[in-house]
Amino acid sequence: MEVQSEWMEKLITTAKNTEFGKKFSFESHHSYESFSRDVPLQDYQDVEPFVQRLIQGEQNLLWPTETRWFAKSSGTSEQRSKLIPVTRESLEECHYKGGKDLLSLYYHHLPNRKLYNGKHLIVGGSAQINQLSADSYFGDLSAIIVKNLPWWAEIRRTPSKETALLSEWEEKIERMAKETIEEDVYILAGVPSWTSVLAKRILEISGKSNLKEVWPNLELFMHGGVSFEPYRSYFQNLIPDPEMHYVETYNASEGFFGIQDQLDTNELLLMLDYGIFYEFIPMTHFDGTNSSKVIELSQVEVGVNYALVISTNGGLWRYIIGDTISFTSLTPYRFRITGRTKSFINVFGEELIVDNAEKAMGFACSKTEAVIKDYTVAPKFMNSIETGAHEWFLEFTTPPDDLNRFRTVLDEKLRELNSDYDAKRYQNFVLEAPIIHILNPGSFDSWLKSKGKLGGQNKIVRLSNDRNYVEQFLSYLSTQQIEMK
């Protein structure tokens, strides 16, 4: 808590003469009580006018040092892209510090490893030059990180920077595969979904049966962006080595928040000294920027679902990033990502969150030897004849042999994980068993590509509380004559 208090004071003091700092009297705030009382909660609509001015070249608006980089954060396929300001301080003291700490923790657990004997393959996003200002650019956070890597990291990175920053993902995967297939890769880093696509192409080109045959010294996969659970069994088959390690990070466009600091659990350690001051809104009190209850770190409890609020050295102030977390430990502060503030289903009082869906999906895949690529879920509403249900649209890399068993295992695990869901499923009074549809391979990617959102940090919405998202998707499939089962 001392570290957090110091960072709150340092952030406020540093930014007191910015336009935002003057507007909300940062100079007069010497306690959390006054800061939280006088500075309103923010979402992207509040920040966007400042971002547009920064893009045009104005400075000293949200943060006093020059802001020339913008991380393209397009959380889901339905939203337009957000441009999050990235300062030199947030890059050095947050994102790069997170990478160094991750490797330090890894070596702490496994001191005899030789990661820097080989190459590090980063499956990153794309960077585009912002033509409105020749000195600034925007792109996926991973691309901004690659573009500014220090020399000691750049000498071990693969593929070439030109290939790494390509925006056309189909060409990019092909070039990455051909450039890296002969390298001695020790580390993979990236989003599981796109890393699996790259791995598949490398195996096709090489004729090998698994990645250890291509890269015998591969030992670490640093992943983030989406839950790893649905992909775990796939990667264990892809890399059949008990010495292979998987380390999760929570590195968003807005900041680097957590690292899996233990090898035997997927809990994340909250990183408290990265230039970020944290606040939390219990989801029972969440109402966007009008939320009635906001607490600081000392008040959080284990097992409560919180919306994350941050103030950062990137110039975000009391910013609601849209993610939800739940603490598993308070000494130290460890947590799990549970979903999004707008990604849930509670049409029937079942309070289903992404964390439930990801765990149940991973369990069902492991029991039926299936590998999921992507999915989305929406409610099927009650009518005079039928009770309600959840309708699952699934795209598999490896489909289950027995779809009925997959559905049964998925349903049973959801009932085990969520007592509200279980109650609504009792004797099918409120909810029927899940309705499962299997999509043709490439269906989600085709839709994303049609919206100009293929690759990078663009994601499919996992859970929707209405049918708007699913109906748009189904309409696209219909116009393209793409069938599903």
Image (cartoon, rainbow, N blue to C red):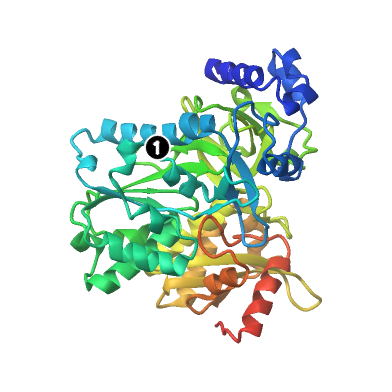
| Residue 270 in view in this figure | no
Report the label total.
1
**177 above or below 400?**
above
Q: Quadrant of the C terminus?
A: bottom right
Horizontal arrangement in the rendering, residue 190 relative to residue 346 (left or right): left
Horizontal arrangement in the rendering, residue 238 relative to residue 226 (left or right): left
Disc 1: CA contacts within 10 A as few (<14), some (14-19) or many (>=20):
some
Out of 117 and 287, give the one closest to the viewer: 117
Q: Quadrant of residue 116?
A: top left
Q: Which residue is mark 1?
A: 99
Measuring from the top left, give residue 378's x and y in whole percent: 66, 66
**421 above or below 368?**
above
Residue at left offset 69%, top offset 42% = 51
Out of 438 and 152, give the one closest to the viewer: 152
Q: Quadrant of the N terminus?
A: top right
**449 above or below 123?**
below
Horizontal arrangement in the rendering, residue 461 relative to residue 198 (left or right): right
Measuring from the top left, give residue 151's x and y in whole percent: 33, 37
Residue at left offset 54%, top offset 26% = 275
Out of 399 and 4, give the one closest to the viewer: 4
Q: Quadrant of residue 62?
A: top right
Measuring from the top left, give residue 364's x and y in whole percent: 45, 64
Name the residue at the front extreme: 134
Measuring from the top left, give residue 472's x and y in whole percent: 69, 72
Determine whether the residue tagged by mark 1 lies in a helix, strand or loop: helix
**450 above or below 110?**
below
Q: Quadrant of residue 314?
A: top right
| Residue 83 in view in this figure | yes
Badge 1 amino acid: Gly
